[in-house]
Image (cartoon, rainbow, N blue to C red):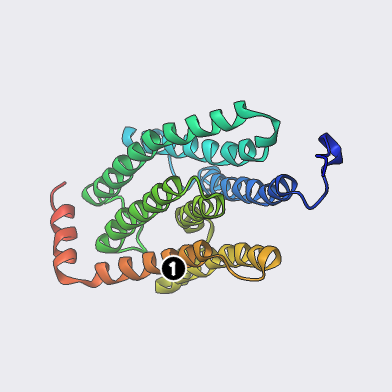
Amino acid sequence: MATLPGDLIPVYSPARIYRSDQRFFARFAMMLAGIILLGFAQWSARGMVDVRTVPLWVHLHAGLMVSWLGLFAAQGVLAQSFAAGPASRELHRKLGFASLGVLAAIVLTGIFTGVRAVELHRVPPFFTDAYFLALTSVGTLMFAGLVVWGIAKRRQSDWHRRLMLGSGILLLEPALGRMLPMPLLGPWGPFVEMCIQLGFVLLLARHDMRRSGMVHPATLAIGFAVIATIFIVTVLSIWPPFVSFASSVAGGA
C-alpha cells in the first residue's frame, strides 16, 4: 500500500493521533502553570506579602519556580510540534535534561526556605511549625520524585506525559494555599486543597477513559501521590520526634 504524503495521512494514523492527544497535555500543562502563577500573583497584589521584606533566598526559590513553570509549559508545546522535524525533538530533549539542574536547585531552596521560615517564625498562623516544615519538605520531595520518574519514563510517552502533568498537580498546593480562605477552613484546609488537586487528576482520568476506555496506571499513581503527600505530612506533623525537631528548629533562630 502506498504511503500518503503530508495532509493526505489518514485521520487514524498514529502520528496524527499522537498530535491530537498531545494537544490535551500541552493545554493542561499551560492551565496548571497559569493557575499556579495566578495564585502567587494575586497573593502579592492583595498586599498579603511585602516583597521588599522577603528574604533573598525566597526570591531565588520563586525565580527558580517561575523558570520551571516556563519550561513545564514550553515542553508540552514542543512535544506537540515533534512532527515538524527532529529539531523540536532535540530541543525538547536538551531542555528536559537542563531542567534536572533547575529541579535540584528547587529542591535545595525549597527545603531551605521552609526551614528558615520556621527559624524566623514566618510560618502562616494556621499552620503549626511541624506541619509547615513537613509540608515544605515532603511536598518538594514528592514533586521532585514525580519529575525524576517522568524523565526516566521519557521513552514511554504515555507515562512521561502523565507523570510530568502530575508534578504540576502537586505544585498546585502552595498556590491553592494562597487562593483559598485557609484561616476560615481551619484544619480542613489541606484536605480541601487535596480534593481540588484530585479534581485535576479526575480530569486526566476522564481523558484516559475517552482515549482508551481505562484509567492509565500513571494517572492512578498521580492520585496516590496527592493522597500520600497529605497523609505523610499529617502524620509527621503529629509524630512526637518530628514535632520536637520542628520546635528545636524554631528555637534556633
At 80% across and 39% down in the image, what residue appears?
3
Q: Dot 1 surroundings within 10 Å: few (below 14), some, or many (20 or more)?
A: few
Q: Residue 24's x, y, as percent?
A: 68, 52
Q: Residue 196's x, y, as percent?
A: 55, 66
Q: Which element is circle 1 on?
A: helix
- Which of the two residues, 27 or 12, is positioned nearer the viewer here? 12
| The N terminus - image quarter | top right
Figure disc tally: 1
Q: Find the residue positioned furthest to the right.
A: 8
At 16% across and 53% down in the image, what residue appears?
249
Q: Is 117 on the left-hand or right-hand side of 36? A: left
At 14% across and 67% down in the image, what residue appears?
241
Q: Residue 106's x, y, as percent?
A: 36, 40
Q: In the rendered image, is residue 10 in sight?
A: yes
Q: Find the residue positioned furthest to the top.
A: 87
Where does label 1 land, which residue? 224
Type of the residue with mark 1? Phe
- Which of the two residues, 170 or 129, is positioned nearer the viewer here? 170
The answer to whether residue 249 is above or below residue 57 is: below
Q: Find the residue positioned furthest to the front.
A: 1
At 32% across and 57% down in the image, what residue appears?
138
Q: Residue 221's x, y, as percent?
A: 46, 64
**Which corner quadrant of the image does residue 229 belong to?**
bottom left
The answer to whether residue 221 is above or below residue 168 is: below
Q: In the rendered image, is residue 59 in sight?
A: no
